[in-house]
Image: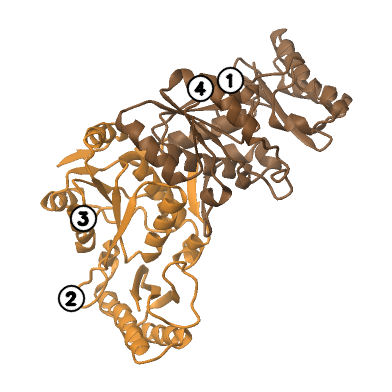
Chain colours: A brown, B orange
């Protein structure tokens, strides 16, 4: 496994693989890897001949009052895990390498980036699409894998790839959960013991919603009300709970197969997201 | 010379050249070609093995009250000219091919796109960078050529290419002028006989500015005032006249070698741009 910090160097190496028409797979991450990341990497490993993983805590996707500086980092542990997964190339650039002085270019997927997480994090997805486009241009992968926990992010990336005519296949991997149902997230370490226990209500309430839909309840309003009630009972502070079309992220009037129920909730100062597809 | 309207088809053809490591050159145009375009095409022809020219009147770079619908078009004449220049491939997509239903992604080069032409045309450069990025992704050229009449555009494109890590070399070609000095532009046909005569003051006033600088005048304010005065005497309605650093487009306090003097002026309803480098 080779680790590159420089754009020019990873490019040179990847050029050699491209000349030989190798299928290049790519999984972008912010590091502090958990089993969710590793499942995406396993999926990419199966589909590609050369597997590239990036580790970059991207400052442009954090708001001014968000957790950029305290976001957890552990490079050595990450590298050990990536080696075990058979990753070929790790890209670990500095902030200066990605955003040198005088940097001015940003990509935006309108509408899709202004709903759900985009309301409380208005600059977040612009930072995500910008860094992902840069990484795509540096690595020029044939395919890239994103997690379905960040469902909105995956929808936005797919839209960007289609709109900008990038010759890249986007795959998504399922949400990986702790034994008690909490969706894996690097941010889970922020939770204290009580918050960690309370946070299990997120997946429980989503499962309840799916059950309720299956028992014949077609009304998104009732479902959303039910979810909110459960979360509040467990001291969660709700950012949003929505029932939307999984392709265009627009609110639905009736629940149906394929409806996305998604939420963002604070426990203490920690903001968690989760979702389920009916 | 082959003409493609479909992204999938031009891509398939270009893939074959790429496999053989041919140097692909690209000149994006909005058609209605004049000697300015042809000079860029000649430059690209010299530097590349496969030469692609696009003809696409890009709706996203026109404001709601601008001349998108009446922008001049003459495909047959353009194709004849391109054939004479030895162009290999013409890309002539429809608006629907470039911006299908549900299109949502835009690229923006901040600051640089908000000065000079960006003040009276606030959405213009976002449309330009978006379509150029799309064309770059479709054609994947090794080099692309832009004209220095649209100096600000060239600066913005160079910044975008650098910021987004695109492996494309950007070249620029000089302004080509009519015998009386008017910069060639597809929009010159909008001018009536009197306006056409008056418009010659633009280059005359830029030449005067350069002479004045050479005679020892270092004051941008005096120069700008002088240019404005001359243009007004010829019934030009001034959008802007600036003296800026040619790299960052910021106003300079003292004229020096490399300062860009640029202007946009209306004659009747026709907006013309021109510039000179000291």
Residue B18 relative to residue A129: left or right:
left
B122 or B234, nearer to the observer: B122
- At 66% from the left and 25% from the top, the residue drawn is A34
Q: Nearer the viewer, mark 1 or mark 4?
A: 4
Is residue B96 in view from this perspective? no
- At 34% from the left and 44% from the top, the residue drawn is B135
CA distance separating discs 1 and 3: 49 Å
Image coordinates of residue B42 in percent, x first then y, are 18, 57
Q: Are marks 2 and 3 on the same chain?
A: yes
Label 2 residue SS:
loop
Q: Are marks 1 and 4 on the same chain?
A: yes
CA distance separating discs 2 and 3: 21 Å
Subunit that carries the residue with mark 3: B
The crowding category of the residue bearing disc 4, from other C-alpha atoms within 10 Å (few below 14, some 14 to 19, many at least 20), is some
Image coordinates of residue B203 in percent, x first then y, are 30, 78
CA distance separating discs 4 and 2: 66 Å
Identify residue for label 4. Answer: A86
Identify residue for label 2. Answer: B179
CA distance separating discs 2 and 1: 67 Å
CA distance separating discs 1 and 4: 13 Å
Q: Are marks 2 and 1 on the same chain?
A: no
**Relative to B85, is A191 above or below?**
above
- At 46% from the left and 87% from the top, the residue drawn is B219
A25 or B64, nearer to the observer: A25
Identify residue for label 3. Answer: B41
Identify residue for label 1. Answer: A39
């Amino acid at each position: 496994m080779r680790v590159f910090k420089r754009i020019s160097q990873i490019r040179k190496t990847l050029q050699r693989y491209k000349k030989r028409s190798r299928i290049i797979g790519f999984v972008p991450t912010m590091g502090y890897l958990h089993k969710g990341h590793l499942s995406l990497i396993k999926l990419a490993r199966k589909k590609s001949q050369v597997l590239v993983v990036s580790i970059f805590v991207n400052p442009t996707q954090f708001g001014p009052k968000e957790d950029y500086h305290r976001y957890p980092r552990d490079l050595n542990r990450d590298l050990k895990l990536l080696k075990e997964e058979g990753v070929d190339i790790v890209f670990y650039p500095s902030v200066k390498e990605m955003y040198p002085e005088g940097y001015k270019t940003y990509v935006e997927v309108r509408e899709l980036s202004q709903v759900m997480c985009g309301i409380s994090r208005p600059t977040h997805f612009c930072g995500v699409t910008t860094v992902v486009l840069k990484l795509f241009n540096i690595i020029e992968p044939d395919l890239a894998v994103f997690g379905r926990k960040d469902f909105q992010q995956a929808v936005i990336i797919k839209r960007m790839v289609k709109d900008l005519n990038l010759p890249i296949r986007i795959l998504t991997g399922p949400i990986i959960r702790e034994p008690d149902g909490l969706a894996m997230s690097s941010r889970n370490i922020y939770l204290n013991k009580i918050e960690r226990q309370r946070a299990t209500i997120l997946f429980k309430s989503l499962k309840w919603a799916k059950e309720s839909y299956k028992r014949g309840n077609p009304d998104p309003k009732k479902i959303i009300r039910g979810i909110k009630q459960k979360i509040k009972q467990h001291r969660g502070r709700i950012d949003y709970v929505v029932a939307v079309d999984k392709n265009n992220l627009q609110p639905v009037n009736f629940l149906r197969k394929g409806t996305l129920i998604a939420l963002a909730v604070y426990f203490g100062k920690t903001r968690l997201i989760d979702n389920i597809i009916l």
